Amino acid sequence: MKTLRVNLIGREYDILIEKNLLAKTGELIRKRLSPNKVFVVTDETVDALYGKTVLDSLCAQGFDTKLVSLPAGEETKCLAELSRLYSEALSFSITRKDMIIALGGGVIGDLTGFLAATLLRGIPFVQIPTTLLAQVDSSVGGKVAIDVPEGKNLVGAFYQPKLVIIDPEVLNTLSDRIFFDGLAEVIKYGLIADKGLFEKLEACDSRSELSEWIDEMVYTCCDIKRAVVEEDELDTGKRMILNFGHTLAHVAEKEYQYKTYTHGQAVAFGMVAISEIGEKLSLMPQGIRERIRNMVLKFNLPDYIELSGDLEKTIALDKKNEGAQLNLVLLSEIGCAKVHKIPLCEFVKQLN
């Protein structure tokens, strides 16, 4: 088993990575934590595949368990479903000595983490990510949130999990669309922090080739994020680089009501678009945009999404926005990211 330790004083936790780890969930939790009750949140797709495996493992260790299965999709990450979870957890008589598990992709992880952060002013929780995107990115770092009509992830908190359990074997049940959705975040990690990772992705031409080193891929991305989070837990400095491509990605997701494009698809477009702007303004070396574009197209991700809404208003709500200034994440070179401040109006002008 590969283990990464996230060293945040008073909030330390391990990331465990190993194939077929899901069936050991109860054992892993028993060794590290001591809840009486375990409240599991998942979605209907994941429940059908892995709900019983996790529940059986928990019950075998004597935990009193309850599982709630929500509809799959970004629309679930909302106030209505959060309210439902509050009621379900409280009817289970959960206490602050108990535990919550997020079993699923990024939507379930974000929603359940926010539930854990806010219910009874904080209940310990464990992330068990089941998509590539969640395994390499959203399950690590403690960003938890829900969406509101004004935008994505605008209501949230920083709340670190007690443990992250990653079983790369579950990725075999993902459709190509969802697998490559997560790969967009892997591409991002190569671009912002690991040139070797990006070049290894460039050398692959298929999902089967990528799957040959999936454990290494997940470990590398988690290790990059671990280091960034340890340096900047609350996203006031270096952690901003993790949002490369995300400003326009969130705009695209909102404009298409979180239905037409997955998060990873939107990020792929966002990385290409922001690189084009960076090169146009001579803030990035020429040629990077084309390498990113070739990569995303190779893995069936979009290099262009038409945006037609009130871009300035939407981007003004971006978490990297500071009044009239936007913190723009760009690349000094492949493998090295930087943050550049730009007037919001100037940025929007470049989009037109």
Image: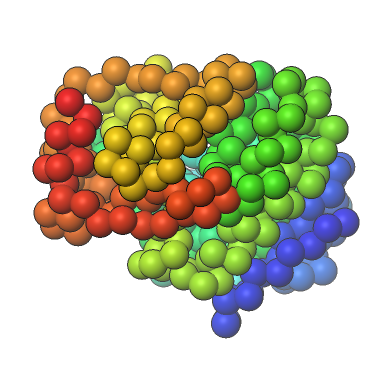
Q: Is residue 215 left or right of residue 229?
A: right
**Rendered-image quadrant of the C terminus:** top left
Q: Position of residue 309 (x, y in %)?
A: 17, 24
Name of the residue lying farthest toward the bottom: 9
Quarter of the image where one finds residue 173: top right
Residue at 43 percent across and 43 percent down: it is 285
Q: How many marks?
A: 0
Q: Position of residue 123 (x, y in %)?
A: 52, 66
Q: Is residue 194 left or right of residue 314?
A: right
Viewer-closest of 325 and 109 = 325
Viewer-closest of 261 and 39 = 261
Viewer-closest of 321 and 83 = 321
**Rendered-image quadrant of the N terminus:** bottom right
In the figure, 124 relative to 349: above or below? below
Q: Is residue 284 left or right of residue 24?
A: left
Q: Position of residue 249 (x, y in %)?
A: 37, 34
Q: Is residue 192 visible?
A: no
Residue at 38 percent across and 20 percent down: it is 304
Residue at 78 percent across and 38 percent down: it is 214
